[in-house]
Image: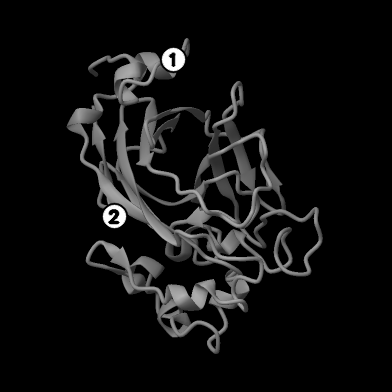
Amino acid sequence: MKKSTFSTLLLGAVLSVGTSLAQAAPDWSKVPKRDVNVFHAGVTPTEWVAKKSDHSGTAGMKKGESCVGCHEEKGTLNFDFKRLAAKDLEPVGAPKTMMYPVAVQAAYDAANLYIRLTFKAPAGGADKGDKDNEVKASVMFPDAKVPQGALVGCWAACHADARTMPGAADKKTKYTKEGSYELMQWKSAKGAKSVDGAVTTERKMDGGTLGAKAEGAKAGDTYTVIFTRKNPGEGKTVPFGLAVHADNASGRFHHVSLGYTLGVGADGDLKAVKQ
């Protein structure tokens, strides 16, 4: 594997990094990018998605059609964003930017899987609940026991009774009724630790099994975040979803992706390059 300094990888941003991640990072110039659009979903938890009167795609999901298969068209998403921004689906207030692209790259070696995100985080959000972090970037991986996890990405962990949902208790976080998600997150606050956690009956921001690490920086108006985690195994296709909290957003006021698949030496919506 070609070694390179982290400052080069992060578009010339200067980082003080003394970790093995900086030592082992791939040559990203040889890894293709795949744009994944993230969008503000408002109040559309898994219960909303599963209700036919609210979501016309319910019938397709029951037949095994993924959200990506229905909603991604010609490099964009075919949502009715006026509907998503309306008061019934976003009672607090929609952000000025409802959707934007995140360039995703993936590479792997014998030990690790690396995921690199590049994006411009928009301002103009209605929520400023996280005063410490201007931006947070997260990746979640559902296991095979999460109902429709491979089809819906993070949605199976998002429920109507979770905090920041209308009328919900303030302490309840993302959770699953079956199965679990692996969770890794980068936070922009100075000195913030990488999150290696999980979502089961509750969300835990530590104690995860990924061995996840994350480094990131902002150069001009562009953020670049690099995650490293244990290689799930060559030949595997892994479901995943992204979330970006921009403009000091907290809770559900993030921009999220649909559910995608990542192939590690295998087919997928995104294919990791072996280095």
Mark 1: give few (<14), some (14-19) or many (20+) Cα within 10 Å: few
Q: Which residue is mark 1?
A: 20
Nearer-the-camera pick, 195 or 81:
81
Where disc 1 sits, the SS reads helix
Name the residue located 50 percent from the left edge and 82 percent from the top edge: 55
Name the residue located 42 percent from the left edge and 77 percent from the top edge: 80
| In-image side of 273 versus 67 (left or right) | left
One can see residue 259 in this view = no
The amino acid type found where label 1 is placed reads Ser
At which x and y percent is residue 100?
38, 55
The amino acid type found where label 2 is placed reads Asp
First in sequence, mark 2 or 1: give its number.
1
Q: Which residue is mark 2?
A: 269
Name the residue located 26 percent from the left edge and 48 percent from the top edge: 34
Name the residue located 66 percent from the left edge and 51 percent from the top edge: 200
Where disc 2 sits, the SS reads loop
Image quadrant in which the C terminus is located: top left
| In-image side of 108 versus 55 (left or right) | left
Q: Quadrant location of residue 254?
A: bottom right
At which x and y percent is residue 35?
29, 51
Q: What's the colour scheme? A: one colour
At which x and y percent is residue 160?
69, 69
At which x and y percent is residue 1?
24, 19
